[in-house]
Amino acid sequence: MTLTQSTPMTVATLADPLSRSLRGGETLYYGGDHAPNLYRLDAGLLRAVSLTSQGRTLTVRHILPGDLFGEEALSTGRRLYQVTALSDAAVRAIHPQHLGAPEVMEVARSLAVQVERLMADGIHLQDGDLRGRIARYLLTLAETSLGSRHADGLRFVRVTHELIAEGTGATRESVSKLIGEMRDDGLVMPAYRCLTLTDEAGLRDLAGAGRD
């Protein structure tokens, strides 16, 4: 799975002049809420989530800086998913009634890029065993605002087992078991809400195992 950041959109000039800040874990809106506007993510990382009939939370979509989202404002007028910040973030509202033809094309282009990303995410969730999916997800998140580096240069990801489970279509128990095995294999080093990628080459090999 590859999260590709969108090119900045000209419709940013039509956004509210005041950017709204979100803290990590804060919800921007919930499924069923009224949808009067679109949003543009200026900084940070968001995700759209959905609850299954079994009460599990699944990550439906990652939202990266430059992405336009909240497209229900152009259709049903009601939010389909809950959107939550995975890191500190900044968003701006964009009012559909102010969009002219060029800006509508920019919105369409942003959404098209995200649809391509969603299709890649679907393959990511279904391709290979869970160890490989976890490895791909960790390497993906390391490229976002959830990733950083220790003083020794090793990369780490601010992530919980629950978030990994929700992003890979697995259970938290299965993820915890495999993270323990990956620790024993020297691939990762778990800490509180953090995983250090101690062997990125090994993770890349694991992520690509069994893939064309």
Image: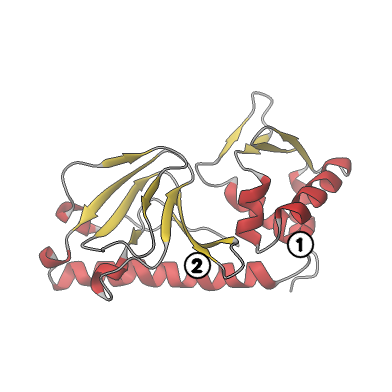
At a point 61% along the width and 32% down the height, the residue shown is 149
Horizontal side of 77 relative to 43 (left or right) equals: left
Q: Quadrant of residue 137?
A: bottom right
Could you tell me which residue is drawn at 26 percent across and 63 percent down?
34
Q: Which residue is mark 2?
A: 117
Residue extending farthest front: 54
Q: Nearer the viewer, mark 1 or mark 2?
A: 1
Kindly identify which numbered label has been placed on residue 31: none
* Tag 1 secondary structure: helix
The amino acid pointed to by label 1 is Leu
Pointer 1: what residue?
130
Badge 2 local density, few (<14 within 10 Å), some, or many (20+)?
Answer: some
Image coords of residue 50 (percent x, y)? 50, 64
Q: Is residue 106 visible?
A: yes
Q: Is residue 139 visible?
A: no
Residue 182 image point, x, y percent? 82, 47
Along the polypeptide, which appears first: circle 1 or circle 2? 2
